[in-house]
């Protein structure tokens, strides 16, 4: 019996020829990532458990991005960043990307890709559930709690159970009004928020491999919304070109065997799918946009690790070009590089930034911003009674701010179309 891509990478990381789902193994970790929400407690646990002589197992493999609660006057949030800053200075860390400096990058999951930390065949752990985003690069990537992260920080190792795999194959050609967000909302609606619990979600098929890296990252990013341990897409030339342009680290390509064992397989015809939303208050509360169109909105939000990449803004700008938004619409680039690309990328000679400004959108600084609610002064935060449509990844009560708000999750196309009308609108009305 062959192995899946996830099993092969975990076998390599554990120094074994073969692993099976359900087995517990020691993994050697290639990268540990943390940020301003979970970094301080991770550091605290590490110092407590490893004592005064605590040593970081490998400074080059530790990456720290302040990104969640940074553009705020909130003293607790500011203190968290100060703890990271002091820690980085004390241990002379090479991979600390401080806010307020030229090194600041924005949202950790996008910055990991842009800065060349996503390397095929490697193992990456992060103190954030959406660390599974990096699986788009043919690598194993997952989120862990602060205690596990502290153990990795001191030893470079972690004890994990090998997950079973689910396979999702998207055949056919993706219509011009659909994005990866629609595909992953379909998956979540089909298997629910616990249908992937402690499993690997593997994405395959011609529609997936026709996507650029930005879009592939949206698929793996939301694997966690099904409770999955990781999402993964085998590397191809598109992946290799992206990686080689950003790092000269060696990498290894792994592919699932033809006789690999999956718990379940799902096959979709991408050409027949239509725009979807996740209705309040769960990412698996799937419906077609057509079924909920006309729902009145108070706010639209285009941003986050899921929906704040360059391709997301290109898609939104196609609809917003030459038009005016009817409700407050927030544009939040996921990284400082994406913010720069908004100036450089054009449609008919007009920059994306100019298109958004002309349409009446508010453009914020790169960060997680309102995706995780945040302090009261967070840009785009949902207040009592608001109905928001957003390109983010979660819509649990209170996720984007007030527990008395409602959040619909959708693609950048659907959010942009809805911004132009003030009600939930099918992007096919504009495309």
Image (spheres, rainbow, N blue to C red):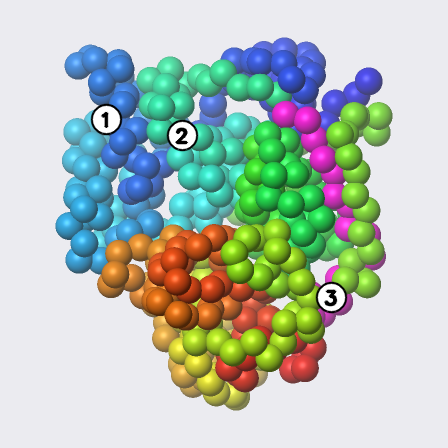
Residue lying at 84% horizontally and 25% vertically, measured from the top left: 259
Whether residue 77 is visible to the viewer of this picture, yes or no, is yes
Query: How far apart are labels 1 and 2 at the CA level?
Result: 13 Å
| Span of residues in magenta | 163-178
- 219 drawn magenta: no
Q: At which x and y percent is residue 233? A: 66, 41
Q: At which x and y percent is residue 353? A: 42, 75
Residue lying at 82% horizontally and 18% vertically, measured from the top left: 1
Whether residue 64 is visible to the viewer of this picture, yes or no, is no
Residue lying at 35% horizontally and 60% vertically, measured from the top left: 402
Which residue position is annotated with label 1? 44
Looking at the rendered structure, which numbered label has been put on residue 274?
Answer: 3
Q: Could you tell whether 118 is left or right of 16 in the image?
A: left
Q: At which x and y percent is residue 306? A: 51, 54
Q: Disc 1 or 2, which lies upstream in sequence?
A: 1
Looking at the rendered structure, which numbered label has been put on residue 145?
Answer: 2
For label 2, the SS is: loop
């Amino acid at each position: 019996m062959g192995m899946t891509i996830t099993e092969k990478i975990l076998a390599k990381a554990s120094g074994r020829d073969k692993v099976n789902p359900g087995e517990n193994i020691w993994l050697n970790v290639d990268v540990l990532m943390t940020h301003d929400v979970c970094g301080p407690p991770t550091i605290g646990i590490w110092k407590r458990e490893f004592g005064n002589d605590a040593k970081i197992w490998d400074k080059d493999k530790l990456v720290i991005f302040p990104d969640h609660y940074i553009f705020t006057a909130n003293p607790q949030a500011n203190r968290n960043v100060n703890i990271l800053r002091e820690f980085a200075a004390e241990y002379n860390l090479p991979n600390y990307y401080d806010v307020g400096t030229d090194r600041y990058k924005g949202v950790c999951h996008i910055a990991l890709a842009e800065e060349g930390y996503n390397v095929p065949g490697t193992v990456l752990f992060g103190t954030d559930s959406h660390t599974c985003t990096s699986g788009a690069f043919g690598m194993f990537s997952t989120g862990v709690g602060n205690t596990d992260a502290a153990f990795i920080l001191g030893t470079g190792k972690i004890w994990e159970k090998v997950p079973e795999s689910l396979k999702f194959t998207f055949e056919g050609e993706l219509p011009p009004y659909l994005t990866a967000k629609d595909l992953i909302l379909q998956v979540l609606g089909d298997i629910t928020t616990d249908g992937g619990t402690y499993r690997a979600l593997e994405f395959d098929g011609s529609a997936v491999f026709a996507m650029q890296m930005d879009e592939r990252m949206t698929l793996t990013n939301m694997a966690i919304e099904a409770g999955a341990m990781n999402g993964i897409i085998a590397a191809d030339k598109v992946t290799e070109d992206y990686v080689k342009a950003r790092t000269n680290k060696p990498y290894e390509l792994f592919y699932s065997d033809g006789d690999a064992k999956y718990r379940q397989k799902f096959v979709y015809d991408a050409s027949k799918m239509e725009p979807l939303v996740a209705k309040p208050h769960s990412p698996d509360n799937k419906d077609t946009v057509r079924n909920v169109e006309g729902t009145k909105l108070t706010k639209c939000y285009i941003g986050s690790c899921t929906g704040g990449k360059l391709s997301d803004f290109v898609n939104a700008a196609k609809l917003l070009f030459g038009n005016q938004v009817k409700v407050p619409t927030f544009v939040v680039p996921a990284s400082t590089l994406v913010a720069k690309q908004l100036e450089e990328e054009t449609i008919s000679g007009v920059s994306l930034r100019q298109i958004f400004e002309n349409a009446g959108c508010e453009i914020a600084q790169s960060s997680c911003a309102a995706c995780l609610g945040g302090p009261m002064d967070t840009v785009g935060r949902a207040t009592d009674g608001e109905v928001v449509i957003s390109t983010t990844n979660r819509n649990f009560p209170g996720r984007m701010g007030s527990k008395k708000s409602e959040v619909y999750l959708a693609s950048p196309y659907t959010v942009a179309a809805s911004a132009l009308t003030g009600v939930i609108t099918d992007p096919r009305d504009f495309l």
